[in-house]
Structures are given as C-alpha cells and as structure tokens.
Amino acid sequence: MTNRFPYLGTVSGNYVPYCIWRNPCEFDIDTKLDVNSWWNRSTAMQDTWRMINYNFGERDFGSARRVPLPPLERACDYRVEIKLNTTMVLPSEGFTTGRRGFDIQIFEDSNLVAAGTVIMRYGDTTAEICIPTDFMFPGDASSIFDLNWYTAVPEFLNVPPDMCGLAIRDRLGDEGAPSAGYRKREVKYDFVVRAFVQDVATGALVTDSTPAKATVIIYPPVGGTERSITAPSQPKEEQRIKMFQRE
C-alpha cells in the first residue's frame, strides 16, 4: 500500500474531494489497518464504550469479518462495535513532517455513508477509531487526535427495536424491530483508510495513493441466543457440503 506521487492533481470520488500533491522528496508512505469487533454494552457508561469489557457480558469477535447481531432478547443492551486500528508507516530518516493523520471513508453495501479526517496532535503514527461510538461523539474520541466527519448520511445508523424504548440511532447492521422488516439481511461495511503527512521543508502534502481497506459483514442471528453466539462463520446456504463415498 505504498506509492510515490510524481504529479499534482485533484481527484473527486463519491463527492468527497481530496488532493494529491507532488512528492518532492519521493519518499513512500504506507497505511495499515486492523479491525476488531465486539458486542458493546450500550447501556453502560459512555466512557466504557471504546474498549471491550468482559465484566459487562460483552462478547469479543476479534478480527472476524462476519459478526452476528446480538439476539433480539439482548438487543436493547448490546450493539456491534467495530474498532479501526490505523497505523501510518513512514521512512525512518530523510525528512521532517508536520501535520499528519488519516482520511477515513465508510461504505455500507458499497454506498458512501461517512467520511472524515483524523489529525494527530502530537506526532503519533497510530489512531484507534470506534464505530459507531466515535461517529456519534467525535469530540470524545481521543486525547491524541482530532476527528472530524465532513460527510455523513443521516440514516447511516439504525435505532434499536421498538421494545427498547430508545430513539437514538446508534446501531450498525440491519438492527431494528422485526415487525418493521429489520433483522433479516446482511449488511456489508467497507472501511477505507489513507494516511497522509505534510513535509515541513516544502509544505507538500504526501498521501498514500493505495489506501488500506477492511470489510466487516454483520448478519442477523439465526435461531435463539445460543445459536446466534455460536453461529457459523458462513450462512447455511454458503457452507460447503462435505461428500463421502464408501468404497
């Protein structure tokens, strides 16, 4: 995910403009992205939302790319949380950087639903962004970076089922009341992250031209609570069928 920029130009994609400046130093910049997911207890205190807490009954799915919604009987207390662990890889010597950060895009079923910028405050090269927590409260995301969402689709997040009595949009996936047609389909999220730095000597903004990408699919639980927790990594219709032949 590295590249060099010999030209100066401006590109606009999905109504999100970004600039690609000539790289006078011809150094490479790379972006790394790791994704972790868990069932976050949304009824706990807000300052606990950005990390998994097993004492709250939260379930960790690690780096799994297919994550089930909490079962309906637990949907009022838990939601799917996705943490983006972003890292920029810079040359070890040869230049001095000023402003640095990450451009982030979120796609739901291939449609752009959110885009924002992370600006590192103290020269750090890593940032953790939690979705939906940091989408709803970007100002509380971290003490080492500033997060600003400049594009957002209002219906990006869903509301919990009616029985929860909560009107806030804070749920990923096809969450909602089954009677209204929710909790029936899979929802695919693509996270695209691009690191950038500013060269102090020239003022040029150097950007990774091949951003990192991660995909997470959230699917409705199948059957009861136990079935949803131990759900297979593939839906039944996608599982491979083993065939045995007796000799």
Image (spheres, rainbow, N blue to C red):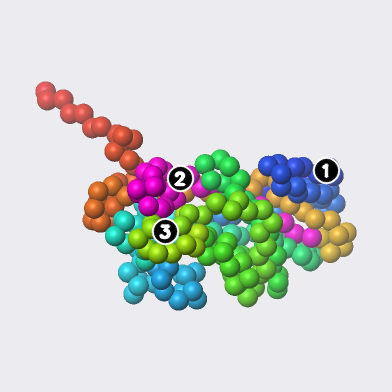
Disc 3 to disc 1, how far (Cα)? 44 Å
Q: Which mark lies nearer to you, 3 or 1?
A: 3
At a point 83% along the width and 43% down the height, the residue shown is 9
> Magenta segment: does it hold 11?
no
Q: CA distance from mark 3 to mark 2?
A: 16 Å
- In the image, residue 116 sits, relative to residue 57, either above or below, namely above
Q: Earlier in the sequence, mark 2 or mark 1?
A: 1
Residue 197 magenta-drawn?
yes
Q: Position of residue 185 (x, y in %)?
A: 40, 42
> Label 1 amino acid?
Gly
Give the labeled residue for mark 3: 160
- The relative height of residue 51 versus residue 161 in the rendered view (above or below) is below
Q: Secondary structure at mark 2?
A: strand
Q: What residue appears at the point 37 percent right and 52 percent down from the top-left corner?
A: 177
Q: Tag 3: Cα neighbours inside 10 Å, few (<14), some, or many (≥20)? A: many
Residue designated by label 1: 9
Q: Which residues are magenta?
A: 173-198
- Reading the image, the residue beneath label 2 is 187
| Residue 107 on image: x %, y % | 57, 46
> Does the image show residue 35?
no
Report crowding for label 2: few under 14, some 14 to 19, many 20 or more residues within 10 A (C-alpha).
Answer: some
